[in-house]
Image: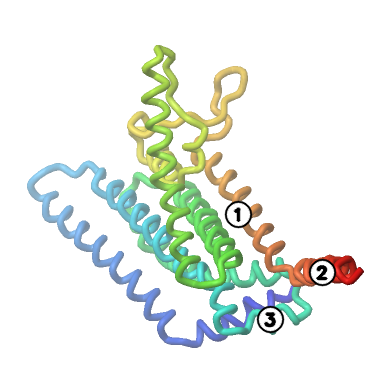
């Protein structure tokens, strides 16, 4: 199976640079310092009080939130300039002249843009595995968190690619991507809270609003609370069968919606990037112009 040529070229260029290894090493080092600090504090305090194990579950939750913030802030900056940057460097036409299809170009740009973030997520797994020594988190739960992060990274990256394809400049594309992410993370919470506040005043109680299922913060909160307990503090209903048993929790639904959004954004980006569609539009416009010129000449 041959790797995507765009991805292969970008990976060779980026991974030869020492900055990629330095960024991974620095990030993992900072996480390790944080974990070691908490471990030392816990060991010192254990001499004076009993150990309950809750400190390491808290470390797990904090590390998960740090990873989430990393994805939400860095991925848009990496992906929003992928296609717009090619336009600014005037190399997009050369890329479109190759035998690659538009969807191959889009997918290649997507995965080369997010590969460093995916490497950071995978490289941080040994830091998360320290929690195993003290209990509270299982391997299956860690895999759940990894799947959630990978899907979230692809979703945010797809939004960035979409904005980069439809907007010709890198800076406006980056700004629009961050605005879109702000809407998904904060805007949906605000709209859902406002709706529930108004709706519940009518006397009919409702505990959720469909727009909240788009929110990645709610998805992470649902996943963490289901793993570390206290689910009632951050409970959003999932999908239930006719017997009242939960089939899919909220975070699984959120991941499914994110995958659908990613597919839609990538498809729209590939349609916009398709040079054949542009050439057809140019021919149609020329034909219309020639008809108008003939009518005027008559």
Q: In this image, 183 relative to 286: left or right?
A: left
- Is any atom of residue 138 visible in this view? no
Q: Are marks 3 and 2 in contact (CB under 8 Å)?
A: no
Figure quadrant of residue 3: bottom right
Q: Position of residue 24 (x, y in %)?
A: 40, 74
**Quick check: 155 above or below 186?**
below
Q: How far apart are marks 3 and 2 (CA)?
A: 25 Å
Q: In this image, 156 relative to 8: left or right?
A: left
Residue at left offset 47%, top offset 37%: 212
- Is any atom of residue 96 visible in this view? yes
Q: Position of residue 187 (x, y in %)?
A: 41, 44
For mark 3, does the 10 Å Cα neighbourhood hold few (<14), some (14 to 19), or many (20 or more) residues? few
**Quick check: 192 above or below 66?**
above
Of residues 11 and 199, the one drawn nearer to the viewer in this rendering: 199
Q: Which of marks 1 and 3 is nearer the N terminus?
A: 3
Q: Which numbered dot is residue 262?
A: 1
Q: How far apart are marks 1 and 3 (CA)?
A: 25 Å
Q: Helix, strand or loop at disc 2? A: helix
Residue at left offset 14%, top offset 49%: 46
Q: Which numbered dot is residue 289?
A: 2
Residue at left offset 56%, top offset 84%: 89
Q: In this image, 153 relative to 42: left or right?
A: right
Label 1 or label 3, whichever lies nearer to me, is 3
**Quick check: 254 above or below 16?**
above
For mark 2, does the 10 Å Cα neighbourhood hold few (<14), some (14 to 19), or many (20 or more) residues? few
Of residues 263 and 54, the one drawn nearer to the viewer in this rendering: 263
Q: In which quarter of the image is the N terminus?
A: bottom right
């Amino acid at each position: 199976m041959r790797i995507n040529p765009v991805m292969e070229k970008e990976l060779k260029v980026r991974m030869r640079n020492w900055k990629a290894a330095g960024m991974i090493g620095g990030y993992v080092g900072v996480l390790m310092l944080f974990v070691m600090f908490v471990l030392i504090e816990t060991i010192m305090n254990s001499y004076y009080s009993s150990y309950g194990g809750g400190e390491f579950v808290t470390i797990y939750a904090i590390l998960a939130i740090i990873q989430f913030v990393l994805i939400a802030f860095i991925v848009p900056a990496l992906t929003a300039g992928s296609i717009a940057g090619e336009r600014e460097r005037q190399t997009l036409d050369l890329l479109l002249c190759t035998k690659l299809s538009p969807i191959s170009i889009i997918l290649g740009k997507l995965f080369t843009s997010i590969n460093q973030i995916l490497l950071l997520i995978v490289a941080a797994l040994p830091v998360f595995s320290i929690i195993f020594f003290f209990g509270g988190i299982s391997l299956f739960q860690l895999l759940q968190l990894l799947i959630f992060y990978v899907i979230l990274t692809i979703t945010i990256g797809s939004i960035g690619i979409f904005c980069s394809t439809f907007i010709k400049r890198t800076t406006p594309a980056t700004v629009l991507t961050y605005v879109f992410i702000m809407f998904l993370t904060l805007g949906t919470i605000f709209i859902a809270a406002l709706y529930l506040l108004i709706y519940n005043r009518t006397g009919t109680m409702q505990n959720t609003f469909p727009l909240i299922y788009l929110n990645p913060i709610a998805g992470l909160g649902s996943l963490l609370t289901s793993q570390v307990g206290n689910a009632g503090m951050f409970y959003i209903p999932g999908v239930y069968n006719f017997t009242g048993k939960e089939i899919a929790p909220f975070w699984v639904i959120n991941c499914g919606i994110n995958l659908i959004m990613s597919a839609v954004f990538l498809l729209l980006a590939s349609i916009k990037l398709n040079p054949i569609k542009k050439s057809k539009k140019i021919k149609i416009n020329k034909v219309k112009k020639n008809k108008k010129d003939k009518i005027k000449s008559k």
